[in-house]
Amino acid sequence: MVKNAPDGARVGSGRSGNGDYSFQIDVAVAPAVTTTVAEQAEDALQLAELAAVRLVDHPQDAEQYLRQALSIGATALPAEHLARLSSQLVIVLSAQPGREYELADAALTAAARWEPISAADAIHLTFVAARACHRAGRHSEAAALFEQPLAAGEQPYPPAEMAIVRRQYGESLRKLNRFRDAAQQFVEAARLVYNNPDRVELEAELTWAAASALDCCGEDEQAVVAFLRAAHLWGTLDRIGPRAKCLRSAAWLQLYGAEMASDRPWLTTMRDLRTELEDLAETSPSPEVTTELLNTRTQLADMQRDEDD
């Protein structure tokens, strides 16, 4: 059967006519020529064992062994064993940066193998494929894959991790110009970490993303609420730049949207922000404070001119 090769080498094995094995060291694993299903299964298992000892130090070798094991064992190994080998291939690929395309394909294959065995594993692997497509910029495919388990109400991870999953889904939707759908995902993601003291920055990022998406789809009043909420969160983190940007965005919407309220809330928002930044410029000067104060003064002047026109 298949024997250990030197580290980093790949082994091919073939059964000769008299039943003995011959071996070669090559850049790829040569398929084993076997005569019975039992021998195919044994060869596949030995290749899987070789992969297991190389998972950490030699992931590319482990990948080749696993692919060969899956090929040889396709009709010889039990379905659950094939599913487990497919999951191991996903793990190996996920540890190799820049392999998102192959990772997505491997994860979908593994998900299909797990589907009749374990729904939880199939759902997890579908998310792995969706997230890989998202990272690879395949946003249409990513959105379709995210939608399948989320539409069914599946929540396989803790709230903070699900928030990140939904953010990635929302980002893919935004890339597809599906701003209303993207906003829904960002809002739901923010809800998952709402008032979590360990996830304030994540909530702020998600709320800001929701506000921007709501702005893009014309939901001005909801966008203002979200921008103000994000500004508040950034303030609790002493993040001057993001807070100022969110407040200015809210003010522009207060000026042009939200039925152009007669009490001029935009003016209050901008003047309060200007005062806040002026105080910081005196007590804690920094290039960031200088930049945000300049932008705030400039945009306030623009708003006042626009109102007069």
Image: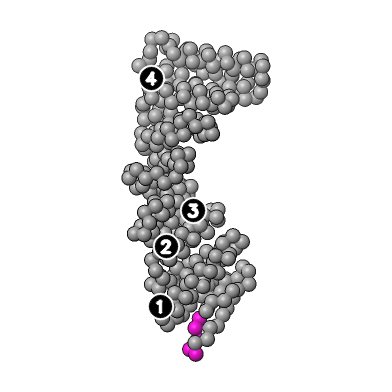
Q: Is residue 213 above or below residue 12?
A: above
Name which of mark 3 and mark 1 comes first in the sequence.
1
Q: Position of residue 298 (x, y in %)?
A: 54, 17
Disc 3 vs disc 2: which is toward the camera? 2
Q: Is residue 4 left or right of residue 189?
A: right
Query: Residue at left 49%, top 90%?
Result: 18
Residue 221 visible? The answer is: yes
Q: CA distance from mark 3 to mark 4?
A: 42 Å
Q: Is residue 39 above or below residue 263?
A: below
Question: What segment is highlighted magenta in the picture?
Answer: 14-18
Name which of mark 1 and mark 2 comes first in the sequence.
1
Query: Residue at left 55%, top 53%?
Result: 97
Q: Is residue 117 above or below residue 123?
A: below
Q: Is residue 272 left or right of residue 130?
A: right
Q: Amino acid at mark 1?
A: Val
Q: Amino acid at mark 4?
A: Gly
Query: Pointer 1: what residue?
Result: 37
Query: Pointer 3: what residue?
Result: 100
Name which of mark 3 and mark 2 comes first in the sequence.
2
Q: Amino acid at mark 3?
A: Glu
Q: Position of residue 290 (x, y in %)?
A: 63, 21
Name which of mark 2 and mark 4 comes first in the sequence.
2
Q: CA distance from mark 4 to mark 1?
A: 71 Å
Residue 44 lies within the magenta run: no
The secondary element bearing badge 4 is classed as loop
Q: CA distance from mark 3 to mark 1?
A: 34 Å
Query: Pointer 4: what residue?
Result: 257
